[in-house]
Amino acid sequence: MAASSNSSLSGSSVSSDAEEYQPPIWKSYLYQLQQEAPRPKRIICPGEVENRPKYYGREFHGIISREQADELLGGVEGAYILRESQRQPGCYTLALRFGNQTLNYRLFYDGKHFVGEKRFESIHDLVTDGLITLYIETKASEYISKMTTNPIYEHIGYATLLREKVSRRLSRSKNESRKTNVTNEEHTAVEKISSLVRRAALTHNDNHFNYEKTHNFKVHTFRGPHWCEYCANFMWGLIAQGVRCSDCGLNVHKQCSKHVPNDCQPDLKRIKKVYCCDLTTLVKAHNTQRPMVVDICIREIEARGLKSEGLYRVSGFTEHIEDVKMAFDRDGEKADISANIYPDINIITGALKLYFRDLPIPVITYDTYSKFIEAAKISNADERLEAVHEVLMLLPPAHYETLRYLMIHLKKVTMNEKDNFMNAENLGIVFGPTLMRPPEDSTLTTLHDMRLALS
């Protein structure tokens, strides 16, 4: 078994130089076992069966006992029949011969056939997948339990190659963007903003730019043989053999997904839209500190709208705001929101507010919402400020940086209060429900908490 587990289907050893990367050695032992698994053998009922469900074929034998089913299977490995339960009419059972015994499974149908979580188009596929799983788990249970102990993930394949590319990309963009953006922001605007935002900005460190992100794993059906990119073992079965990260495309066993580090690097080709996309996912896909839609909108607003009366309070035309949204979803950072296309600045402010409202996880996350509200209840001003500051430090780095940047911008808005009539309280009323929402969807809760937070 040990010798088989180290055999290779493709690839060779990996060079330490990412530029000379070679495919890893895939472990073929579980693939060989799948090839050896028993094949399904349908036992056909010789006569017509009354009241046979239309979604079952001639493998259905009607109401028979377990003993009769066992006799019909004849001790043939992989043989199967369907029957209706004697004890519970209307309930159906798959009788399957495996390992010199007859196994009985309660069978269900909802448009597809299933015994457990997996759903199949046909009984034949269900039995085929079941026999593969039974055989592999019987022959290699100890091997499977140890698959995750010596992963290839940290040494070769996806992680190493991507880490090299990302580190080079980050070092370049850090030097460029921090010199041009962060330095200017913090040396000009931070001097004039509240002590709370200043302290948050000054405690911001370089590690926040290299944002950590969990993989967005979803059960996936792989067509053709596939190997796990964490443990290098074959992903067995016909359907739902493992999970795939919908943001970066990493393919792993379901059990291996629990051990994969939070190092997802989203691929822009997989990010279908800008609005309604997770904030951290978006910034990592674009390799930016903040969502580019926030940067682009704020630059446009500061260039031509800071003195506009009722800025952020006055609404733009909904259909034009939707146009801006579609432009960002379609063109990304190349979206044109200039005055030539959208002369009304309220359309741009509306698009920015809509972006924040559409986030699946708000800027002030669900996890920190209750802590933020509790901090707002503190009567002593200094203690309240300290408590709010501590909560801000709990935000995910991308959320923290986005909020920091927005607060600097909103301070600039209040500095033009004589022209735009928007003070801090007015902006709080506008942005409060946009930036933070309670975990449970309750309008009364939201109104009560907003009143508390703004008081």
Image: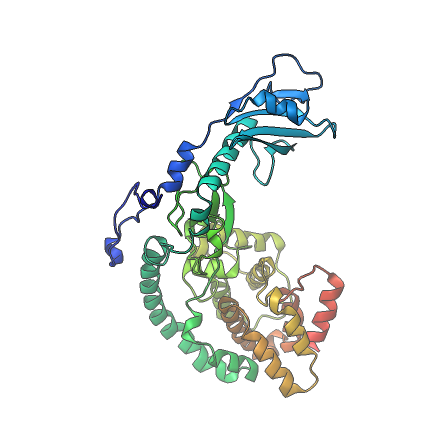
Q: Is residue 210 above or below residue 276?
A: below
Residue nearest the viewer, comparing 388 with 359: 388
Q: Is residue 222 above or below residue 128?
A: below
Asked whether the viewer can see residue 98, the reply is: yes
> Could you say where residue 23 lies in the image, as x and y percent from the top left?
29, 48
Residue nearest the viewer, comparing 88 with 357: 88
* Point 71% across, 19% down: residue: 51
In the orientation shown, which residue stands out farthest toward the top?
Answer: 47
> Could you say where residue 273 lies in the image, as x and y percent from the top left?
50, 51
- Dividing the picture into quarters, in which one does residue 185 lie? bottom left
Query: How was the colour assigned to the protein in this rendering?
Result: rainbow
> Could you say where residue 134 lies in the image, as x and y percent from the top left?
50, 37
Asked whether the viewer can see residue 339, the reply is: no
- Dividing the picture into quarters, in which one does residue 316 lie? bottom right
How many circles with numbers are drawn on the protein? 0
* On-image quarter of the N terminus: top left
* Point 65% across, 86% down: residue: 381
Residue nearest the viewer, comparing 405 with 415: 405
Q: Is residue 144 above or below residue 347?
A: above
In the displayed structure image, the side of residue 371 where residue 401 appears, left or right = left
* Point 61% across, 71% down: residue: 309
Residue nearest the viewer, comparing 81 with 272: 81
* On-image quarter of the C terminus: bottom right
In the displayed structure image, the side of residue 425 where residue 218 appears, left or right = left
> Could you say where residue 360 lies in the image, as x and y percent from the top left?
58, 57
In the displayed structure image, the side of residue 229 where residue 281 appears, left or right = right
- Dividing the picture into quarters, in which one does residue 415 lie? bottom right
Q: Is residue 275 above or below residue 208?
A: above
